[in-house]
Image (cartoon, grey):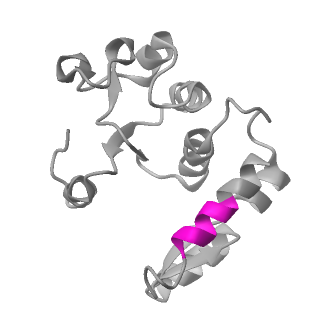
Amino acid sequence: ACALAQDQTGYLLADAAFSSKLVPSASLGECRTLARLGKIPVLLPSRLLFAADPVEWSWDVTSDAVAAWIAWLTGAPQLVILTDVDGVYRGGATDDPAALIEQIAAQDLVLLGHTSIDACAVEFMAKKSLPGVVINARHPARLADWLEGRRVR
């Protein structure tokens, strides 16, 4: 059910009302083809997930874990998690800027338990040595800065 819900989110994101460049895609091959054509593929992950069965089927597994698996599968140099907070906080204190952890290894993040990144994703990142960054999507300029190689908080 979670994988199908992620497909539905993908269809919403790829709605022509937002952009004519965003196109839903059901496979990695289709994503590559669309990118070559100057389009922005929005991966609908359910078919890939059902075929490979890479993660535990549990409500503890969110799009974070799916994104981590896809990043690893495609050889991405880094995982970007867009969320509604500025990053990972000590003790979950998302309203305390002093609790923001500027940088942490995935292996150390595992020890924190519940954070803004789902535990399955964190464990997968640690196991595969996949670096990641958390960006607050409420501030789109931060994603643009990151994409252009500038440091974001």
Q: Position of residue 71 (x, y in %)?
A: 53, 49
**Residue at the spot x=44%, y=30% of the render?**
116
**Residue at the spot x=45%, y=84% of the render?**
21
Where residue 102 sits, quadrant-wise, is top left
Determine the residue located farthest toward the front in the rendered image: 95
Residue range corresponding to the magenta coloring: 7-14
Give whichever of 41, 71 is nearer the camera: 41
Q: Quadrant of the C terminus?
A: top left
| Residue 9 appears left or right of 86 | right
Q: Is residue 12 inside the magenta stretch?
A: yes
Q: Position of residue 134 (x, y in %)?
A: 36, 39
Q: Position of residue 61 (x, y in %)?
A: 67, 34
The rendered magenta stretch, by its main secondary structure, is classed as helix
Give whichever of 130, 9 is nearer the camera: 9
Q: Position of residue 65 (x, y in %)?
A: 60, 39
Where residue 143 sits, quadrant-wise, is bottom left
**Residue at the spot x=51%, y=18% of the render?**
114
Where 93 falls versus 24 (above or below)? above
Q: Is residue 80 inside the magenta stretch?
A: no
| Residue 47 appears left or right of 12 | right
**Residue at the spot x=32%, y=18% of the render?**
93
Where 35 falls versus 125 (above or below)? below
Q: How many marks?
A: 0
